[in-house]
Image: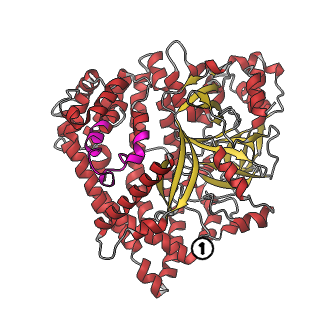
């Protein structure tokens, strides 16, 4: 497959990292590196470098003020339940609340009273209320003499029991998360809110100023923020912990922290796993992303309303394409893998030199390699042989599998259908968000066309879905005939159980029932051949690292709450220096430099009220904190736990952060709090909101 890759000077950025990894994870070389769990901060490094160590009370306050929502992060910023996050994190909800007559994404929104705040269709706001190490309990479930599958099922059953007992006793959403790729298991207890209401969102033109051209670059000038309010029982919540606002922000070289939910990193994968990503996963994902963008752009070309409906999906896919292209090039050019080979060789040498360690952990790499080779056997079938791009198809899949799983004992169900997960399942399934049949049909037809090209006509998935018909005709029949766009129909089917499902004549349900045996066979194969081998091998590898290095490193990101720290600092870029911050002077200059065209224009209110603005107001800034996707919307805070920024992006050099961290050039980009206040007060006339935020 041919593709144009980003031009980034990876080898230069990787040179210092090579030394770090050869020396065996000496974290003192990179004080800013690390997505640390709240129970295991690098206290000595913080104290030595900055003379500061967060107290237990500081950590609890920050943890309870931090929230997870959608695919990103946020924070409480007032005692009245006000939550700050990014526009692009909330954009899915903003789009769902929009209509052809009232485009909130394009034109923005401001509620001038509590009564005007609009309930989001399916937003969840989660707060990590408690956490507990349950590693010993999970490990005790594995009995001597168990084979790999028996051990996998025993581990899964114990995790299910832990989650159910916790949820039944506390009422909190309870989930056991794996950290250090199986080195530890922690029970996370989460307070979940399902009534979030839109309070304020700027125009997308201001939030995403510069568009995809400026995405993952710096200097930047974005107002990428949205305000939500969290309600419970019809009233705003009153969080005991919220972040106080520091409009002055942080100064250059100041110590700052980011509290958020980084989605996924692969810094602890083996070389074999990274090579699989390079050879199989990235080419597949990038091709699908490219093809889906073509489908959506063609759909958008049908008219302005179609363009509005597809806009948010295009935005997400463009962002994904840029991220994955940068990561893929990092794997292709060999620099990352060279670092990882040296890292892996150093660890293996230490393990094999100790007889006890060799016996306990020495076969971990071999077993992981075995699982990776197995994955390749069916990678094409698994990736392309499924219904993609359709929310309605996802609803059908959830309903069919729920009807079968719910009648089993909790410990025997597939993941996603345990008692502790059903509240979240129902919340998503009963969403009031609009479903656009024309967009659904275009997406489904396009993805089926891709599957037909990638798989043979005799493939079981192709035979079952198309049955000799064309992708376009089948998609038209499925979407045109289904009633699943109606939440009441979905609720009826869920409550009707398996009997109702089996007699249902809805074409999407009927098709999913036909596909169910194939999907279950694939899932059984994956658990037996891959997961049962990979899970214990990854646990061994994690314990091997603990044995050699102790618990001086941090776990890979898993969309769980983490704390990272660093300094407000510019960086070398393109033969010159990137400043640590930008201002509103730069915003208007950049717009005028492009003749106010396209992505570089600004909303009319900016030009109409320009003279009222203090153009020296800081707009965006960068810091050395270690983040990745999922951190969007995270608060940047100072040592007083005051909010001094809002994370919304990383620079191009940060794209390699999935695999490695380089403090010299990897930067987090944040909205300055002064810009938010200046905009709310002088551009949007939101004085009462400013008063609430500043505690006036």
Q: Is residue 193 above or below residue 685?
A: below
Q: Is residue 617 visible?
A: yes
> The C terminus lies in which quarter of the figure?
top right
- Residue at the disc numbered 1: 24
Label 1 Cα neighbours within 10 Å, binned few <14 / some 14-19 / many ≥20: some
Q: Position of residue 130 (x, y in %)?
A: 57, 53
- For the record, the magenta segment spans 399-423
Q: Position of residue 376 (x, y in %)?
A: 31, 58
In the image, taking residue 55 as reference, residue 284 lies left or right, namely: left
Q: Residue at x 82, y 24 (%)?
A: 613
- Whether 158 is among the magenta residues is no
636 relative to 437 in the view: left or right: right
Q: Nearer the viewer, residue 325 or 392?
A: 392
Furthest residue to the top? 101
Q: Is residue 497 above or below residue 153?
A: above
Element on which disc 1 rests = loop
**Residue beneath the point at 59% across and 26% down:** 198
**Residue 234 or residue 457, whichever sits in front:** 234
Q: Which corner quadrant of the image does residue 683 belong to?
A: top right
Q: Residue at x 56, y 56 (%)?
A: 131
Q: Is residue 258 visible?
A: no
Residue 469 appears left or right of 367: left
Q: Is residue 684 left or right of residue 232?
A: right
Q: Is residue 142 above or below residue 405?
A: below
The dominant secondary structure in magenta is helix
Does the stretch in magenta take in 421?
Answer: yes
Give the camera-side residue of 178 and 623.
178
């Amino acid at each position: 497959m041919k593709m144009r890759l980003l031009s980034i000077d990876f080898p230069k950025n990787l040179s210092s990292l090579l030394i770090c990894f050869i020396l065996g994870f000496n974290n003192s070389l990179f004080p800013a590196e690390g997505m640390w769990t709240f129970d295991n901060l690098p206290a000595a490094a913080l104290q030595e470098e900055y003379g500061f160590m967060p107290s237990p009370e500081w950590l609890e306050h920050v943890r309870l003020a931090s929230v997870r929502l959608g695919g990103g992060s946020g924070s409480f910023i007032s005692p009245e339940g006000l939550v700050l996050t990014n526009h692009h994190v909330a954009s899915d909800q903003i789009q769902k609340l929009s209509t052809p007559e009232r485009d909130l994404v394009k034109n923005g929104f401001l509620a001038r009273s509590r009564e005007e705040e609009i309930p989001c269709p399916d937003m969840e706001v989660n707060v990590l209320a408690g956490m507990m190490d349950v590693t010993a309990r999970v490990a005790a479930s594995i009995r001597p003499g168990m084979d790999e599958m028996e051990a996998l099922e025993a581990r899964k059953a114990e995790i299910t029991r832990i989650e159910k007992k916790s949820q039944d006793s506390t009422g909190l959403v309870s989930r056991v998360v794996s950290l250090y790729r199986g080195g530890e298991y922690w029970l996370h207890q989460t307070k979940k809110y399902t009534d979030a209401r839109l309070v304020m969102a700027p125009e997308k033109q201001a939030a995403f100023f510069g568009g995809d051209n400026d995405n993952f670059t710096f200097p930047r000038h974005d107002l990428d923020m949205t305000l939500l309010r969290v309600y419970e029982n019809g009233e705003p919540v009153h969080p005991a912990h919220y972040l106080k606002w520091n409009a002055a922000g942080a100064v250059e070289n100041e110590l700052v922290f980011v509290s958020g939910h980084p989605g996924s990193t692969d810094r602890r994968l083996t070389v074999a796993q990274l090579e699989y990503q390079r050879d199989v996963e990235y080419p597949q994902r990038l091709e699908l992303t490219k093809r889906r963008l073509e489908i959506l752009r063609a759909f958008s070309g049908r008219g302005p309303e179609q363009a509005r409906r597809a806009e948010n999906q295009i935005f997400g896919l463009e962002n994904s394409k840029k991220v994955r292209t940068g990561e893929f090039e990092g794997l292709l050019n060999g620099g990352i893998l060279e670092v990882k080979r040296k890292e892996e060789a150093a660890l293996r040498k230490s393990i094999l030199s100790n007889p006890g360690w060799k016996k306990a952990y020495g076969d971990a790499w071999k077993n992981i390699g075995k699982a990776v080779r197995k994955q390749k056997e069916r990678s094409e079938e698994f990736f392309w042989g499924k219904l993609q791009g359709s929310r309605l198809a996802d609803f059908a899949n959830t309903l069919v599998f729920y009807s079968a799983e719910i009648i089993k004992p909790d410990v025997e169900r597939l993941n996603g259908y345990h008692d502790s997960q059903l509240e979240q399942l129902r919340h998503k399934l009963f969403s009031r968000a609009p479903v656009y049949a024309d967009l659904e049909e275009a997406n489904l037809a396009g993805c089926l066309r891709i599957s037909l090209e990638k798989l043979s006509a005799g493939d079981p998935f192709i035979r079952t879905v198309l049955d000799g018909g064309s992708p376009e005709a089948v998609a038209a029949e499925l979407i045109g005939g289904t009633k699943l766009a109606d939440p009441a129909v979905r609720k009826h089917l869920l409550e009707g159980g398996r009997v109702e499902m089996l007699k249902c004549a809805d074409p999407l349900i009927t098709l999913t029932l036909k596909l169910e045996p194939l999907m279950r066979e694939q899932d059984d194969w994956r658990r037996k051949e891959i997961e049962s081998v990979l899970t214990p091998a990854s646990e061994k590898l994690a314990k091997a690292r603990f044995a050699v290095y102790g618990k001086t490193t941090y776990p890979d990101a898993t969309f769980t709450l983490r704390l990272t720290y660093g300094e407000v600092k510019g960086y070398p870029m393109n033969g010159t220096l990137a400043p640590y911050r930008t201002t509103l002077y730069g915003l208007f200059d950049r717009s005028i430099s492009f003749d106010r065209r396209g992505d570089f224009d600004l909303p009319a209110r900016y030009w109409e009220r320009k003279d009222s603005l203090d153009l020296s107001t800081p707009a965006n800034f960068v810091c050395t904190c270690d983040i990745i996707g999922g951190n969007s919307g995270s608060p940047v805070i100072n040592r007083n736990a005051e909010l001094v920024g809002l994370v919304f992006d990383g620079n191009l050099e940060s794209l390699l952060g999935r695999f490695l961290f380089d403090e010299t050039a990897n930067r987090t980009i944040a909205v300055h709090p002064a810009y938010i206040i200046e905009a709310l007060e002088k551009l949007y006339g939101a004085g009462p909101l400013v008063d609430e935020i500043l505690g006036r």
